[in-house]
Image (spheres, rainbow, N blue to C red):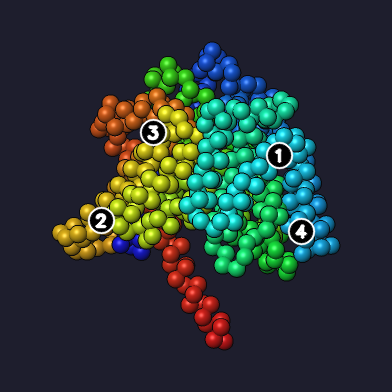
């Protein structure tokens, strides 16, 4: 109830003005903290000379961003460009065999990059999970897959396997764990889909072609085997209307976002400041709230751009890959919170939805979320921060259901029905605003540190009460209402589309 309730236009204008003013206010505090503390010793490692015509140093604390768009940019572009060229040539010459070409090119690229011992290790994982897949028992596929995943996440097995990879270069650790981890998850998807296949089995070559598709190999996203197999073997390679225009537009948009983020890093040191706890304790409540929020927004931007670049390449291969994650600003419920839509889709398909069903039963939902976050913990690498992150996000997901169940019984449901949709939307917005900050605090600890998350929580909930607490919640409430208005308009458009389609068919 409340999603279709329209609020007065002047009220939405007020929310927009408040939100814009608050964002500018918080940004000014962060800019001041960045400018006044640029010479601190704690900043030396992560604040380096940037673009010379800005005359300011740049925040380079995120190795992954710097790797993608500065240090190893040319290497990544070279590998992906080669894939695009080979894919285009063989899609025209032999469209029936393009999946084989994708696999061969990807396998050779991985061999050249990581060496034959790494390829042999990945192949051993493939052989093990393919052998289990032939038994067609899902629990065995899960057991073998999770055991294999644990072997690269837990000591001493991960160190032993990593030592097999010869050579030494800056990206070796990242490519090793990324390549092995995503490879095992793809092999598990293959094994589980093979269990669903009624007639015969998929071949080992199908697994290799799926696993060694280069754009997805090291960094994801994961595309489940059933979707990839159907799409890559589709021989009618026809572009949708304006598809190339959309691909070009998205590529230029990603380039623009990269430039904008680099510019922001010259003025707002949002990644470096939270690592200096002595400085953080001196900052205002608004500055802390802005830092916590901006760190999650940046992580979303990074995921959206990195997956967007990969998705652009895979779209050129006539695939429909998992889309970038939903913006953190648009999230006010735990059920939609994720930063990797590929992993999220994998977990939902094989674990969360499989166990939880329609997610309406409290016990089944609890079991589904515990299993989901247990696998997620293993995927991320078990450690204290990951344990805490998993616990609180699992709790948040279940708490939403408990609250929804509680308020769906009389007299609360009767009171909500009597108050009208617009008022219901406003009241729900208050709870959603509090939920939004729970999402921020539960996730910022994994992006920065547990100490930073605890400090932000204490300042906004206890020490800042009532002024900082209520003002931040009010600003968040304004943002939630704007998001709800956008969702309302999209829902109305979705209702109109089927009617229009029906009229076209009748004509």
If you read the primary sequence from the N terminus, does the residue marked by circle 3 or circle 1 appear first? 1
Alpha carbon distance from label 4 to label 1: 24 Å
The image shows residue 73, relative to residue 413, as above or below, that is above
Residue 222: tell me if it is visible: no
Quadrant position of residue 233: bottom right
If you read the primary sequence from the N terminus, does the residue marked by circle 1 or circle 2 appear first? 1
Q: Residue furthest top?
A: 41
Q: Which residue is mark 1?
A: 120
Q: Which residue is mark 4?
A: 98
Q: In the shown orientation, is residue 274 left or right of residue 190?
A: left
Alpha carbon distance from label 3 to label 1: 35 Å
If you read the primary sequence from the N terminus, does the residue marked by circle 3 or circle 4 appear first? 4
Q: Which mark is residue 405?
A: 2
Q: In the shown orientation, is residue 200 left or right of residue 143?
A: right
The image shows residue 14, relative to residue 194, as above or below, that is above
Instruction: Give the image location of residue 71, x and y in percent.
Output: 70, 30
Q: Residue at point 69% right, 51% down?
A: 208
The image shows residue 468, relative to residue 409, as above or below, that is above
Element on which disc 2 rests: helix
If you read the primary sequence from the N terminus, does the residue marked by circle 2 or circle 3 appear first? 3
Alpha carbon distance from label 2 to label 3: 26 Å
**Which-is-in-front pick, marks 1 and 2?**
1
- Give the quarter of the figure containing the N terminus: bottom left
Quadrant position of residue 320: bottom right
Q: In the shown orientation, is residue 10 left or right of residue 314?
A: left
The image shows residue 123, relative to residue 58, as above or below, that is below
Instruction: Give the image location of residue 222, x and y in percent.
Output: 59, 49
Instruction: Give the image location of residue 324, x and y in percent.
Output: 56, 49
Residue 387: tell me if it is visible: yes
Q: Label 2: how many residues lie within 10 Å, few (<14), some (14-19) or many (20+)?
A: few
């Amino acid at each position: 109830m409340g999603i279709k309730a329209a609020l007065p236009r002047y009220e939405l204008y007020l929310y927009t003005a408040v939100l814009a003013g608050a964002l500018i206010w918080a940004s000014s505090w962060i800019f001041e903290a960045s400018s006044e503390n640029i010479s601190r010793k704690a900043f030396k490692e992560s604040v380096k000379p940037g673009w010379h015509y800005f005359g300011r140093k740049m925040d380079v604390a995120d190795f992954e961003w710097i790797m993608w768009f500065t240090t190893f940019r040319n290497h990544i572009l070279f590998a992906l460009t080669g894939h695009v060229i080979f894919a285009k040539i063989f899609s025209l010459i032999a469209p029936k065999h393009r999946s084989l070409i994708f696999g061969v090119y990807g396998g050779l690229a991985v061999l050249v990059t990581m060496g034959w011992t790494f390829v042999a290790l990945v192949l051993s994982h493939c052989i093990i999970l393919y052998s289990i897949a032939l038994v067609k028992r899902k629990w065995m596929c899960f057991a073998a897959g999770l055991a294999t995943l644990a072997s690269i996440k837990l000591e001493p097995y991960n160190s032993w396997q990593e030592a097999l990879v010869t050579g030494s270069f800056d990206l070796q650790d990242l490519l090793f764990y990324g390549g092995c981890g995503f490879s095992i998850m793809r092999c598990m998807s293959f094994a589980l889909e093979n269990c669903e296949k009624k007639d015969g089995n998929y071949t080992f070559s199908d697994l290799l072609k799926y696993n060694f598709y280069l754009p997805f190999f090291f960094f994801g996203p994961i595309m489940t085997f059933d979707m990839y197999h159907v799409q890559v073997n589709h021989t009618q390679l026809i572009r949708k209307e304006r598809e190339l225009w959309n691909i070009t537009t998205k590529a230029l948009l990603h380039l623009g976002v990269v430039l904008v983020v680099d510019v922001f890093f010259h003025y707002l040191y949002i990644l470096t400041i939270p690592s200096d706890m002595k400085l953080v304790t001196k900052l205002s409540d608004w500055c802390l709230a802005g830092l916590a929020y901006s760190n999650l927004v940046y992580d979303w931007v990074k995921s959206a751009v990195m997956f967007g670049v990969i998705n652009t390449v895979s779209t050129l291969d006539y695939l429909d890959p998992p889309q970038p994650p939903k913006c953190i600003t648009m999230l006010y419920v735990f059920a939609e919170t994720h930063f990797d839509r590929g992993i999220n889709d994998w977990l939902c398909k094989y674990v969360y939805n499989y166990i939880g069903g329609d997610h309406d039963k409290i016990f089944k939902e609890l079991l589904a979320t515990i299993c989901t976050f247990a696998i997620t913990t293993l995927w991320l690498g078990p450690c204290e921060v990951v344990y805490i992150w998993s616990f609180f996000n699992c709790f948040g997901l279940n708490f939403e259901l408990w609250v929804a169940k509680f308020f769906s019984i009389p007299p609360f449901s009767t009171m909500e029905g009597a108050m009208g949709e617009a008022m219901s939307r406003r009241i729900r917005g208050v709870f959603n605003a509090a939920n939004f900050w729970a999402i921020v605090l539960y996730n910022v600890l994994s992006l920065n540190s547990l100490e930073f998350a605890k400090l932000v929580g204490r300042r906004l909930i206890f020490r800042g009460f009532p002024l900082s607490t209520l003002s931040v919640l009010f600003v968040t409430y304004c943002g939630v209402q704007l998001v709800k208005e956008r969702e309302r308009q999209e829902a109305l458009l979705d209702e109109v589309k089927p009617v229009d389609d029906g009229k076209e068919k009748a004509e």
